[in-house]
Amino acid sequence: ISDLIFVHAVQSELQKVKFKLPYLQYMIDIRNGQKIIVPDDQMKQFIAVAGTYDEHLIFFSPDEVNLRKGTKVRITGGNFEGYEGVFVKVKGARDRRVVISLQGVIAMAMATLSPDLIEVI
């Protein structure tokens, strides 16, 4: 993911790093003007899926995918069992895919999953 660094730290430690490297900037949520903080469980899922090096992963900026129209689902089997995402139609794909999202940062559509591995939440 070009030009992004994800950091897991307490605010005081992050401030020390930013003081030494002033060109680093927080990513801001344009809806509320607040710094974007990714919850640990979302980040773990994102790392696991992105780390598969699956050529069928498709990455999107937040404005390219309307997740509000999708159905929230949980994957019930396979490598990503227990992960949650949104089931949406992805532009350019013939079928629907499960999208894992870091709110306001990035979304990625997973390879097509068998319907028997997906449950609606």
Image (spheres, rainbow, N blue to C red):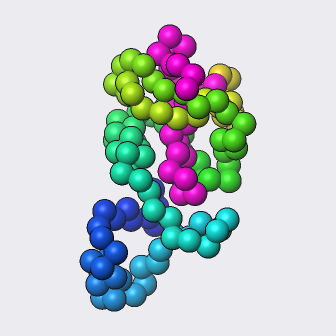
The quadrant the N terminus occupies is bottom left
The quadrant the C terminus occupies is top right
Q: Tell me residue 21's x, y (percent).
A: 34, 85
Instruction: Determine if the magenta segment contains residue 109.
Output: yes
Q: Who's the residue at 39% across and 41% down the image?
A: 45
Q: Tell me residue 84's x, y (percent).
A: 48, 33
Question: Is residue 53 at all visible to an observer of this figure?
Answer: no
Instruction: Determine if the magenta segment contains residue 94.
Output: no
Q: Who's the residue at 54% across and 13% down the image?
A: 115
Q: What is the magenta range?
A: 96-121
In the depicted structure, whether residue 84 falls above or below residue 120: below
Q: Is residue 8 left or right of residue 109?
A: left
Q: Tell me residue 117's x, y (percent).
A: 47, 16
Say which of 7 and 40 sits in front: 40
In the depicted structure, whether residue 68 falls above or below residue 97: below
Q: Tell me residue 33's x, y (percent).
A: 61, 73
Say which of 76 and 63 sits in front: 76
Picture quadrant where residue 24 is located: bottom left
Residue lying farthest front?
121
